[in-house]
């Protein structure tokens, strides 16, 4: 039987995994630095650095594709549910605020041992307004800002989620590979694929299943933070519960199983020769990042609540209660009501100033980053270890400091490691480099 607490914990883990449809660290500002050239499609690059000025998007040469060419974005696991990450933390924050408020009951010392307790804390907890985390339009949506930029620049693109009804980010690799192949077979344009996280596993399986499309229909591929060899975060999930949760979303538990190292390692080994043939046919860039979260991510909700209900607020509330008690010492209900009203006003003022500042210090996947860095000692982006992004024959490109979300989405009110301009610039330069290599790659 699945209890509510078990379901909530598993849902949080699944939602953290959703950022496996979600990038992190090398230098101080986002940019790209390819590793050694691969044996095939990467040949001709010589491992030369991608020329990028990430903080000056206007200085980046506009991306101009050839006639009859377009970019196809392929999003990762559960990318349409990132809002739920915010909802989950909202619940934790509101519960922590209520718990902290209940500790504000005031004790008044009266003459002749007639001390009295005023239950102001319970009253404040019950009257607290719910805190809602602000999410801007397009927040937590993969490639949203890139698509806006491409529209403004007149760059031809499509998003697989929009053009394929069967494609479902919570479905299995096999299911989504078939959906991608259907789109590729229908299109009359040459395509450069830009995929993120699990979307890259869907893409790899599709291209391995249709080698005739490689080099003809698909002329290049940018795989961003792809868990080609699996993720330890997926390894920690419980199979039957994955299916239970994902069926409600139109997906299936196999989508999580497909991300596990015990599934990916045999897959990569069994298909090594075919992968090398693929990367020999077209240029492929596998971009990764690593970072280290600050140590202050544990117990964030409780820490935030404590910053609101601190000694200063306790002193102010106590003074309010004492003043109201002196006005009407025989009417305790009136004392509680009047004091609660004033205390809520103080809490509102404190929360308004503290929430945005506090949320901006915590990364979306800092918790799993700390786990993989500290416990497993694996350089990672919060969800995908660097080593997992290695693809035989592909150029390995290191992205600069940031987490798994950085290259594809805005995560306000969480910490954004990259700006919108930096995200767009990196995407454009990765595509430009792959497109440039198509002129030297074997045809």
Image: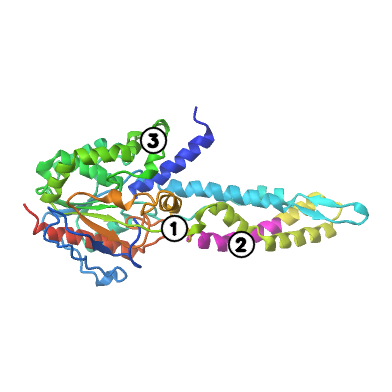
> Dividing the picture into quarters, in which one does residue 323 lie?
bottom right
Q: How many marks?
A: 3
Q: Are marks 1 and 2 in contact (CB under 8 Å)?
A: no
Q: Are marks 2 and 3 in contact (CB under 8 Å)?
A: no
Q: Position of residue 335 (x, y in %)?
A: 79, 54
Residue 339, above or below 5: below
Q: Position of residue 281 (x, y in %)?
A: 10, 49
Q: Residue furthest top?
A: 1
Q: Position of residue 38 (x, y in %)?
A: 16, 55
Disc 2 to disc 3, C-alpha distance = 38 Å
Q: Which residue is drawn at the image coordinates 61% and 62% (left, top)?
A: 349
Please give the residue where the numbered disc 2 appears in the rendered image: 350
Foreground tag (2 vs 3): 3
Identify the element where label 2 is drawn. Answer: helix
Q: Earlier in the sequence, mark 3 or mark 1?
A: 3
Mark 1, residues whose alpha carbon is within 10 Å: few (<14), some, or many (≥20)?
many
Foreground tag (1 vs 2): 1
Please give the residue where the numbered disc 1 appears in the rendered image: 293
**Colour scheme in use:** rainbow
Identify the element where label 3 is drawn. Answer: helix
* 438 in magenta: no
């Amino acid at each position: 039987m699945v209890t509510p607490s078990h379901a909530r914990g598993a849902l949080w883990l699944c939602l953290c995994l959703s950022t496996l449809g979600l990038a992190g660290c090398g230098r101080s500002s986002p940019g790209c630095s390819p590793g050694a050239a691969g044996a095939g499609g990467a040949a001709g690059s010589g491992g030369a650095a991608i020329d990028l000025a990430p903080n000056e998007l206007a200085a980046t040469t506009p991306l101009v594709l050839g006639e009859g060419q377009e970019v196809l974005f392929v999003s990762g696991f559960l990318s349409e549910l990132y809002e739920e990450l915010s909802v989950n933390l909202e619940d934790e924050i509101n519960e922590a605020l209520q718990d902290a408020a209940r500790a504000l009951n005031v004790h008044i010392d009266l003459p002749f041992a007639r001390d009295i307790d005023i239950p102001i804390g319970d009253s404040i907890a019950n009257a607290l307004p719910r805190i809602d985390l602000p999410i801007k339009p397009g927040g937590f949506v993969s490639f949203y800002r890139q698509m806006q930029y491409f529209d403004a620049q007149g760059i031809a693109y499509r998003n697989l989620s929009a053009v394929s009804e069967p494609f479902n980010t919570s479905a299995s690799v096999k299911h989504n590979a078939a959906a991608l192949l259907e789109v590729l077979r229908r299109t009359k344009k040459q395509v450069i694929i830009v995929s993120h996280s699990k979307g890259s596993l869907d893409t790899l399986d599709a291209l391995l299943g249709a080698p005739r499309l490689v080099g003809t229909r698909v002329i290049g591929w940018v795989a961003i933070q792809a868990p080609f060899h699996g993720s330890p975060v997926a390894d920690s999930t419980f199979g039957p519960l994955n299916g239970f949760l994902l069926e409600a979303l139109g997906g299936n538990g196999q989508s999580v199983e497909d991300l596990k190292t015990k599934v990916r390692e045999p897959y990569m080994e069994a298909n090594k020769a075919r992968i090398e043939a693929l990367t020999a046919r077209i240029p492929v860039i596998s971009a990764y990042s690593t970072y280290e979260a600050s140590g202050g991510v544990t117990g964030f909700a409780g820490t935030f609540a404590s910053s609101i209900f601190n000694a200063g607020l306790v002193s102010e509330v106590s003074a309010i209660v004492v003043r109201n008690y002196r006005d009407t010492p025989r009417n305790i209900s009136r004392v509680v009501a009047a004091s609660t009203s004033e205390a809520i006003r103080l809490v509102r003022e404190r929360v308004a100033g503290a929430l945005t500042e506090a949320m901006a210090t915590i990364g979306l996947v800092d918790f799993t980053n700390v786990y993989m860095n500290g416990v497993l000692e694996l350089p990672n982006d919060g969800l995908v270890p660097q080593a997992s992004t290695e693809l035989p024959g592909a150029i390995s490109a290191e992205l600069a400091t940031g987490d798994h979300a950085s290259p594809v989405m805005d995560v306000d009110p969480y910490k954004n490691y990259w700006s919108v301009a930096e995200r767009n610039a990196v995407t454009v330069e990765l595509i430009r480099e792959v497109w440039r290599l198509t002129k030297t790659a074997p045809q």
